[in-house]
Amino acid sequence: MPVTRSVVASFKGRLVGAPPLSSLCTQAHFRFIRFYSASTHPPPASTEALTIGMVGSGPAGFYTAQHLLRNLPNVKIDMYEALPVPYGLVRFGVAPDHPEVKNVIHKFETIAQDPRFRFIGNVRIGHDLDLAELKPRYDALILSYGASQDQRLGLPDEDAIPNVFSARAFVGWYNGLPEHRDLNPDLESSDTAVVIGQGNVALDVARVLLMPLDELAKTDITEHALEALRRSKIRHVHLIGRRGPLQASFTAKELREMIALPDTKLHLDVPLLQSQMEAGSAILSKERPRRRLMELLLKGATNPLSNTSPTSKSWSLKFLSSPIHLVTNPTTQALEGLQLEKNRLEGPLNAPRAVGTGEIEEIPCGLLLRSIGYKSVPLQGLPFDSKRGMIPNVRGKVQNEDSFTSGIYVAGWLKRGPTGVIAATMYDAIETADTIINDIQKGELQPRIGPTVPPGFKGLESMLRARGVKVVDFHAWKKIDEVEVAEGTPKGKPREKVVEVDKMMEIAGR
Amino acid sequence: MLPSITRLSQAPCRLLLSVSRRYQSFSPRPFRVPIPQRSFQSATPLLHKAVEKPKTGEGLQVNYITPDGEKVTVYAKEGDNLLDIAHANDIDLEGACEGSLACSTCHVIVEDKYYDQLEEPSDEENDMLDLAFGLTETSRLGCQVIMSKELDGITVRLPSATRNLQVEKLR
């Protein structure tokens, strides 16, 4: 008789009508009990559980874990996180003035309390522990470590000129990402900032630069960023896009917030917008989101109120422009401006290309943030599509070029490229979890049993300790969480984030 | 728990949403509905709102059609929204932002004749619907559909998106 544990097959009928997340733990347990009490088999020993390792603790990781916990009563999940603190971009990416978006953390906390789940913070896979060391310890690995790099402009001296940053680093700076806490952008030498890119990250950084400080002060923005923004002289922000308004990738909520900024006027080429809307009317009539976005843009740019009352701040959307040269002061090397080449659009209306016209425009600026997309970095031994910045996969399953990649799955931005809101990541995570469940059903993923049962995290802690790595479990993270909330409360903030890994570790060790 | 995150899901706050959402203050959650601790659960339960179920034989009928095509009929009280009702009845409708109009994960597709009974969605709701998977002419966010006598018997479908497609094939 073949000795394979049927983790899913006998449980198939229960996939229907899964419980809401809010009662995940309870339901999972009830199901577990119901299942095994109805079964003729005794409950398996804990060593027999399907053991899954995950890398990355952002929304993709948590949503994948949630779907697996819900559908596989016998699963054990170890979630590795490079930092001592969980939640990835929910903590470090979502803008501080969007606390509603962070409500999803409540759900993740519930998932983390499931006894079948373990958070393993402060362990960097590929540094403290190799993927090759992790792989044999699990039946399957799910990589959801996101996109930790950003696309570059490709301009000479892009990295050498002071006050030229990636928006990713700037966001990390104000959101307390330890890596970028010392970014120290100069917001006082100039009144103008330029953001290259017209997506939601671009709007986020523009909004943080222009929004009223008393609003920002009530958020979980880091104190060092708030201090710098208090001294900021930035009054004008230009957002540069190489193509036209129809190709802008920000969404309506973020645009609406920008338009609603007090004492701030929006500038854009209204005739261009109108002509593009007219030319693209066939597309717009079919695509409600884009149509609403363009209508909102036109309304925001032609609002008679903001046209009459003078404002002290402004933002602009510059279309059909590509950055070609950073202008610096010859003696101080300080950034003084940006040269743009004007573009025209060629090709099909729904996906036109920007083609340079040779016409040059120069705009003065003292801060430049590039926000033209993130990209993931590959872990050693894995295939990687460097053009799209993701691991090639089919519905979350890493393509099986050799035995090493077998049993490795991806979720989130690493799986589909760095784009999309939390809802997109949720669906995508469910797809990856379903792929795993199917692979078990089809026998392509067979949980190992008996003496070969994968040990998971067992034994790793001492090995990591020998390498000088201290693990932060969920309980230790909650200590950091409590300290942050306690420090934020007197300031009227939801939390004051700890921004140094050393301090996080000190609190976790208390 | 994050004590001072705004809880816009509470019904009275719906009015607030029509004024400028951006500049309303992020006030601490004013009131927390006590929720009984359940067994097997060490975390604080994170229900949006403790929705009281009506007495047997009373209440307004709500029919949910799950992504698997299963019809689940439940009863709810006037004033409760479709997200909270779903959660109170163990129906799998996500609500990542807890009803604060910051995501589209509680997207439901409303039966035509009931859709027309609903008030027009706000700009903020439409902004989020624009990001929903499988947007239709009668799509709404579950957290914004408040039960009233006129909606008694309403049927909403939970969009299937990508989920369970493969699993389905194997059954």
Image (cartoon, coloured by chain):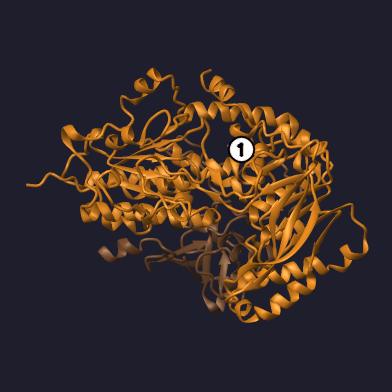
Q: Inspect this view and state whether residue A426 appears.
A: yes
Q: Residues within 10 Å of mark 1 (few under 14, many from 20)?
A: some
Residue ranking furthest to the left: A1
What's the residue at 58%, 46% (across, down)?
A: A103
Front residue of A178 and B60: A178
x, y percent for residue A494? 67, 37
Q: Which chain is brown?
A: B
Q: In this view, does A206 lie to the left or right of A43?
A: right
Helix, strand or loop at mark 1: loop
What's the residue at 52%, 52% (across, down)?
A: A418
Q: For residue A438, which quarter of the picture?
A: bottom left
What's the residue at 34%, 59% (across, down)?
A: A16
Q: Is residue A198 left or right of residue A306?
A: left
Determine the chain carrying the residue at label 1.
Answer: B
Q: Inspect this view and state whether residue B171 appears.
A: no
Identify whether A238 is placed above or below A209.
below
Instruction: Specify the colour of chain A.
Output: orange
x, y percent for residue A488? 69, 31
Q: In this view, does A408 lie to the left or right of B157?
A: left
Residue at label 1?
Answer: B2
Q: Quadrant of the C terminus of chain B?
A: bottom left
Identify whether B32 is placed above or below B62.
above
Front residue of B68 and A386: A386
Q: In this view, does B22 lie to the left or right of B168?
A: right
